[in-house]
Image (spheres, rainbow, N blue to C red):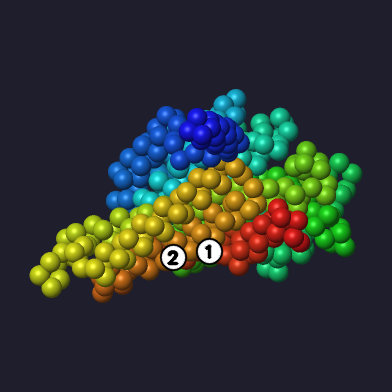
Amino acid sequence: MVAGAILKTTKLNSNLLQCVKFVAQSRSFTTQLTEQQLEIQELTRNFSENQLKPKAAKLDSEGRFPFSEIKSLTNLGLMGACVDQSYGGLDLDYLSLAIAVEEISRGCASTGMILSIHNFLYANLVNEKGTPEQKERFLCDFTKGSLGCFALSEPNAGSDVANIRTRARKDGDYWILNGKKSWVSTAVEGSAAAVFATFDPELRHKGLACFLVPLDAEGVFRGKKEPLMGVRAVTACDLMLEEVRLPSSCLLGREGEGFKIAMEQLDQGRIGIAAHAVGIAQSALDTAISYAKERHAFGKNLTRLPSVKDRLTDMCMLVETARLLTYRAACDVSTKNSAMAKYVAGRAATAASDHCVQVLGGRGLSTHYSAERHYRDARGTQIYGGVTDIQKRLVGHYLLKEHNAL
C-alpha cells in the first residue's frame, strides 16, 4: 500500500513536471531581461538622468523641440533601434525599444514621445513593409537624423479610421493626393510621413492605401503648431495635401491594404505609448518618494505617515503592473496585448501622477516642481494612439473571439 502511494505520488510529480516544461516552452514572455536589453536600459537610464532630466522643465515651459537631445539619441543609434543594420539601424527587438522609450520618458516625456513615434510608427513600418527602393529613400536618412511621421487622423476620422476622406486618385504611373490630416506629431520638423488615404470612399476600410510622402513635396503644407496641455516640447500640426503628385513607388504595400497596415502599425504604436506612460508614472513615483523622504510633518518624515505610505504603495503597484503588461505586449505583439498595455499604462500614469501631486500638496501645483508636469504629460497617454474607451472595446472583442463567444 505504501509502495503504491509512493508510486502514485511519483507519477503525479512526473506529470506535473511535464506540464510545467510544456508551459515554459509554449510561453515566450519572461521578466528576465537579456544582457543586451539590460545594456540598453542602463544606457538610456544614464542618458535620461544626465542629459534629459535637468532640461525637461525648461523644454516644457518654452515648448521647445529637443533638437540636440534627439541628435544625441541619433548618435546612439536609437532613432533606428529596430531597423536592419544594412539601413543604419541597431536591429533590436521591440522590448529593447520599449525599455528605451520608458527610460527616456522617465527623464523627459516629450523626448520619449518623439522617440516612440519615430520608431514604432514610422521607421519600423518602412523597415518591415517597404521595398528596397523605399527603404533607400525613406529609411536610410531616417536613422541618421531625419524624422518620420504617421498621418492617419483627420478632422472627422480619429478612432473611426474607415471614415478617412483624404483622397488618392490614380493618374497613370502617379497618385494625386488631396485632403487634410490632423494632429500629426513632429510634422513641423519631419521630413516624410506615412499618409493614409482612400481611393474609393464607398469601399470604406477596403478602399484605403498607405503612401510615403516627402513633406517638402509640392502641394504639402504644414499648419500652425497646436498648443498642447502636456508633452509641450512635441510639435503637432495639420497637414494639408493639395494636388500632391507622387510616383507609384511611394505606395506602401498594395491598394486596399491601407487599413490592415494602419491597424498592424497601431498595435506597435500602442506598445510605444504604454512604455511612454510607464516612464511618466515611474518619474512621478520617483518625485513623490524623493519629496516624502525630505518633507517633515507632525514631527516625522512623510514616508512614516500611513496615508502617504499607502499612496506610494499604490503608485508602486500601478507602475509595476503597467510595466509587466507593456513588456509582455512587446514580446508577443497582438491587438489584444497592446490594447491592454496601453489601457492599463495610461490609466496608471494618470493615477500615479495624481498621487504625486497629492503627496507634494501645495507644491504639487507649483510649476517649480515636476509633479504638475507629470500630471499634464500623463493625461495624453489615454488619448493619442486610440482613446482608452476604444482600447477597452478592443480587449473585450478579442477576448470573446478567443472563446468563440462573439
In the drawing, what numbered circle is on residue 350? 2
Q: Residue at x 23, y 57 (%)?
A: 290
223 or 54: which is nearer to us? 54
Whether residue 282 appears in this view of the structure is: yes
Q: Residue furthest right?
A: 172
| Secondary structure found at label 2 | helix
- Distance in Å between CA atoms under marks 1 and 2: 8 Å
Placement of 181 over or under 91, stated as above or below: below
Left or right of 384 in this view: 286: left
Q: If you read the primary sequence from the N terminus, does the residue marked by circle 1 or circle 2 appear first?
A: 2
Which structural element holds mark 1?
helix
Give residue 280's quadrant in the image. bottom left
Whether residue 236 is visible to the viewer of this picture, yes or no, is no
Marks 1 & 2, CB-CB < 8 Å contact: yes
* Whether residue 49 is situated above or below residue 281 in the rendered picture: above
Rendering coords of residue 225 (x, y %)? 53, 62
Residue 256: % across, % down: 83, 49
**Residue at image x 70%, y 59%?**
400
- Image position of 293 with respect to 330: above or below: below
Question: What residue is disc 1 on?
Answer: 382
Three-letter amino acid code at the position of disc 2: Thr
